[in-house]
Image: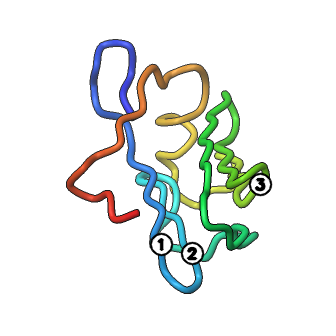
Amino acid sequence: MYDKDSNYISIVGVKFSSTMQYWIYRCSGNYTHLPVQPPVDAETIWTIEKTETALFITCNDVEVLDYLFTNSSDDRCVPTLGGDVVEQIEFSSTYDTA
């Protein structure tokens, strides 16, 4: 994720495994199981939405993550991602294994 000046802010990782996991740089410590596992469909459509207070991930219209920045134990989370700071999300081909 990048700000309006194209400065790097954070990373959101989703690990595609038997139990899917997520990680948010400067918010969550390690990869953690998604609270809701995505549906098992042949075709999947993922949506990532960031508001001023939370990050939402859905898969085929099923919300799999509702991450409130204030619930993070990392003191950098709210200052880094809270508010209207993200202007761009980039999907890195280096890490894309989906």
Residue found at the very far bottom of the displayed protein: 18
Q: Which residue is mark 2?
A: 20
The reply, left or right, for residue 3 in relation to residue 22 is: left
- Image vertical order of residue 13 relative to residue 57, above or below: below
Q: Mark 1 — residue? A: 16
Q: Earlier in the sequence, mark 1 or mark 3?
A: 1
Instruction: Specify the amino acid type for callout 3.
Output: Glu
- Image quarter where the N terminus lies is top left
User: 45 or 81: which is nearer to us?
Assistant: 45
Q: Residue at x 35, y 43 (%)?
A: 91
- Are discs 2 and 1 less than 8 Å apart at CB? yes
24 in relation to 41, above or below = above
- Residue at mark 3 to residue at mark 2: CA–CA distance: 13 Å
User: Residue 42, percent across and down?
Assistant: 61, 67
Spot the residue most to the right.
Answer: 62
Q: Could you tell which of marks 3 and 2 lies nearer the N-terminus?
A: 2
**Helix or strand or loop: what does disc 3 sit on?**
strand
- Measured as percent of width and height from the top left, residue 2 is found at 36, 28
Q: Residue furthest front?
A: 42
From the image, tell me which residue sits under label 3. Answer: 63
Indicate the position of residue 57 as horizontal and vertical percent values.
65, 50
Separation of disc 2 and disc 1 at Cα? 5 Å
The 10 Å Cα crowd at callout 2, few under 14, some 14 to 19, many 20 or more, is some
Three-letter amino acid code at the position of disc 1 = Phe
